[in-house]
Every structure is written in C-alpha cells, then in structure tokens.
C-alpha cells in the first residue's frame, strides 16, 4: 500500500478525508479531540513538503436527524465548530468553506497557496455522500491533485468521500495517511500474524453485534473472553438463571452453537463466573456479588465479579497477542467500573511484559482513556464499526479503493 511517505507534495494540493466526527457539548466545545489530533501528522507532512491541504469529513447524521420542522440542523452538524481548535493545533489559520462542492468552495481551494489549509463543510449535508454518488464524488475530487484517506473509522462505508472519490485519481496520486496506514498494519498483524497465545476480549451489550467477529476469531484465537451484557445470553443458554440481566432470547441457540464450535476447534471461551448485581440500573442501586449460576430474579448483572476478574487476568497475563473490543460492564457508573478497569490494567501489564495489544471500539477506547492507560497498550484504534468489520473478515471499501 502506498502511504504519504511515497509522495512529495511540493506545490500540490492534497484532498484529505479525515474523521472529524467528534463530540461537542451544548456550547459546541469539543469534548474529545482524539480524532483531530490523530490526523495532524498526515496534514503536517503535506504542509512541510510545501503543499496545501483541503480537508473533508462527515459529522453525525444530519439527514437522518432533522429538526422538528423537517429541515437540516446546519448549526448542530456544522464542521465550522472544529475550525478554531484545528487552527490552534496546527498553528495555522485554517480556512472554512460553508459547502463542500459549491462554486465558492472550489474558488477557495483553487486559490490555496502552499502551507494553507481549507476545511470543507460536512459532506453528509448532501445525499450524494452516503449514496456514494459518482457526480458528487467527482465534484469533491476537483479539490485536490492528490487524494489521501486518513479516516479509518469510516473505511467500512462505500461513501463518496471515503471510496468513490478515489476513482478520480491515478494510482500514484492516492495514498493512505499515517493513521490509516497504522490502523491497517496493526489490525492485519493481529488478524494474520498474531503471536500465540492470542486472546480476544469481547464485551458490550449484544451477542448479535459481535456474532460475526466471534465466528471469525474462532479460526485464529486461542482464548475468547466474553464479558459485558452479551455474556448473560451465553450464561442463560447454559441453563442458568440471570434475573433481569440483559439477554437476547433469540440468540440462545446460537450462543450454544458458538460454545460447541469453540470446543471442537480447541478454542477456550471464558465466561464470567460471578457478577456485581444491582436491584436497578443506577449508580445509586443496592449491589452485591452473585454467582452466575443463580442471579436472583429481581436483580441484574452490571459488572463482572472478583472471581471472574482473577480468571480473566490469568489468561491475559499469559497471552502474547491481545485484542480488546468492548467493556466488561457499565463502566460509566463508578459502582460498575471495577471489572473494565481491572481488565484494562491487566492488558497494560501484559503489554509491558512483551505482548502486542490492540484496543478498539468506542467504549474500549473510552475505558483506556478514562483510566489513563492508552499509552500503555500497543495500539489504540480510532475505528469502531470499521475495526469490527475488518476482524469479521470483510473487505473495507475505503481501504480497497487505495490498493
């Protein structure tokens, strides 16, 4: 794959697909700028070469979340709220276009001088973006001499700005940004070149969200640790009482099928032995620890218990490759964060002892950030759905478009 290191951008205008789909508070202050900071090395490479930069990104789903009067909320979903912070990070007065394909936007991008940066308005203000419209992609392509994709988090979408636009550039004039290249390289290492023992840690709410990745991991992992809400579908499938814990009753047979398939393949699936249970879904709830073979009818499991933590930590400690996607419980609430925190610490310790660890998925990333462990794992992925689809064995359109 060709990266930005293969191109000299002197006097060239680089059209870069970034992922500036960042969260804001009610006053439009950015509450997490991780994705913006992740794009800086690629932007700076172009600028340092003597080129100019045109940035494009989506923000939210403006055409799916209309205002009460049926119109698009152009204020809430505008990328103009990113401009000042990006300018500060780059120490560069970033220009902004109020549309991504208007004549005015083209005029601004055509007049860019080396060292200048232009941010285009939200690509999803146009229906052609998510439809992968050829004509819309062609208009976007006019903004650059070279196309760079540095938005791994959107690489699983065959949208105009992530995939279709690449058709309008010669092979030598399109490349992976540093972030995209690192994401693909690290995910590929885990998927195709993992050192054994390989342990996958999967959490989150639903088995249905993770079924394809579990099926694929059965072919490469030695251990699969299952926590979070999804664990209780497996526990119930084995015939135990789980009270009001989250369960997908239509997934019970499939859960048993997965357990049998894992046994046949020699893959060890570890389910939590005990749980921190609560009488309501609230941080003020009454809590206690219960064995997972008998959770009281009126109670729900919201975190893994002490025995589960010890068992999971032992497996993680002896692993050489670790993939972590999904929390062990409702870690946003202090009473139910110990399981997720303990697993995060275990992954960090294993990494310090030489294991390769990849953490991906929004909640897992939020967890390592919350517990200040992001710099103690091997790689933290910015891709949620894209990373899942990669480990499901699917070809990502945004990656294939640059190959």
Image (cartoon, rainbow, N blue to C red):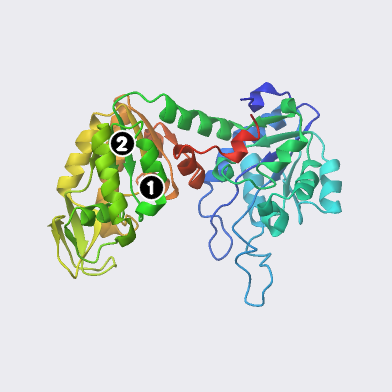
Label 1 Cα neighbours within 10 Å, binned few <14 / some 14-19 / many ≥20: some
Q: Nearer the viewer, residue 386 or 350?
A: 386
Q: Is residue 209 left or right of residue 61?
A: left
* Real-space CA distance between mark 2 and mark 1, rounded to the nearest whole angstrom: 23 Å
Q: Position of residue 179 (x, y in %)?
A: 56, 34
Q: Which residue does the numbered mark 1 point to in the structure image?
A: 211
Q: Is residue 115 above or below residue 244?
A: above
Frontmost of labels 2 and 1 is 1
Q: Quadrant of the N terminus?
A: top right
Q: Is residue 167 left or right of residue 272?
A: right
Q: Position of residue 137 (x, y in %)?
A: 75, 46
Numbered disc 1: secondary structure: helix
Q: Nearer the viewer, residue 191 or 352?
A: 191
Whether residue 226 appears in this view of the structure is no
Numbered disc 2: secondary structure: helix
Q: Residue drawn 53% across and 56% down? A: 23
Mark before the other along the chain sequence, 2 or 1: 1
Q: Nearer the viewer, residue 174 or 268?
A: 268
Whether residue 342 appears in this view of the structure is yes
Disc on res. 347? 2
Q: Is residue 326 left or right of residue 180?
A: left
Asked where in the image residue 78 lies, by quadrant, the reply is: bottom right
Q: Residue drawn 31% across and 28% down? A: 352
Q: Is residue 12 left or right of residue 383?
A: right
Asked where in the image residue 281 lies, by quadrant, the reply is: bottom left
Pointers 2 and 1 in contact (CB under 8 A)?
A: no
Q: Position of residue 22 (x, y in %)?
A: 56, 52
Q: Residue drawn 71% across and 32% down? A: 47
Q: Residue drawn 76% across and 52% down? A: 100
Asked where in the image residue 53 lies, by quadrant, the reply is: top right
Q: Position of residue 92 (x, y in %)?
A: 70, 41
């Amino acid at each position: 794959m060709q990266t930005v290191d293969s191109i000299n951008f002197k006097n060239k205008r680089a059209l870069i697909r970034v992922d500036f789909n960042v969260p804001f508070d009610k006053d439009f202050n950015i509450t997490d700028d991780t994705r913006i900071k992740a794009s800086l090395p690629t932007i700076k490479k172009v600028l340092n070469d003597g080129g100019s930069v045109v940035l494009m990104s989506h923000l939210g789903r403006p055409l799916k979340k209309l205002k009460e009067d049926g119109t698009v909320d152009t204020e809430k979903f505008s990328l103009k709220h990113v401009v000042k912070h990006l300018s500060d990070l780059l120490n560069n007065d970033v220009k902004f276009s109020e549309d991504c394909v208007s004549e005015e936007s083209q005029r601004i991008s055509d007049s860019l001088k080396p060292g200048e940066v232009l941010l285009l308005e939200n690509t999803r203000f146009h229906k052609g973006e998510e439809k992968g419209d050829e004509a819309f992609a062609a208009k976007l392509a006019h903004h650059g001499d070279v196309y760079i994709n540095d938005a791994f988090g959107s690489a699983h979408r065959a949208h105009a700005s992530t995939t279709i636009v690449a058709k309008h550039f010669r092979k030598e004039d399109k490349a992976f940004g540093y972030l995209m290249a690192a994401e693909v390289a690290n995910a590929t290492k885990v998927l195709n070149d993992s050192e054994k023992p390989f342990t996958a840690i999967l959490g989150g709410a639903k088995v249905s969200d993770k079924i394809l990745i579990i099926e694929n991991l059965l072919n490469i992992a030695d251990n699969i640790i299952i926590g979070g809400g999804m664990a209780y579908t497996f526990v119930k499938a084995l015939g135990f009482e789980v009270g009001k814990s989250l369960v997908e009753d239509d997934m019970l047979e499939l859960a048993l099928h997965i357990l049998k398939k894992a046994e046949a393949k020699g893959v060890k699936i570890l389910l939590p032995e005990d749980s921190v249970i609560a009488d309501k879904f609230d941080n003020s709830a009454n809590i206690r620890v219960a064995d997972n073979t008998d959770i009281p009818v009126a109670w729900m499991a919201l975190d893994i218990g002490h025995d589960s933590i010890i068992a999971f930590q032992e497996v993680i400690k002896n692993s050489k490759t670790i993939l972590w996607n999904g929390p062990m419980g409702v870690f946003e609430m202090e009473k139910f964060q110990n399981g997720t925190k303990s697993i995060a610490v275990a992954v960090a310790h294993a990494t310090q002892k030489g294991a390769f660890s990849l953490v991906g998925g929004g909640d897992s990333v939020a967890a390592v950030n919350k517990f200040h462990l992001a710099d103690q794992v091997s790689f933290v992925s910015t891709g949620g759905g894209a990373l899942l689809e990669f480990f499901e064995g699917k070809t990502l359109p945004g990656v294939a478009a640059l190959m």
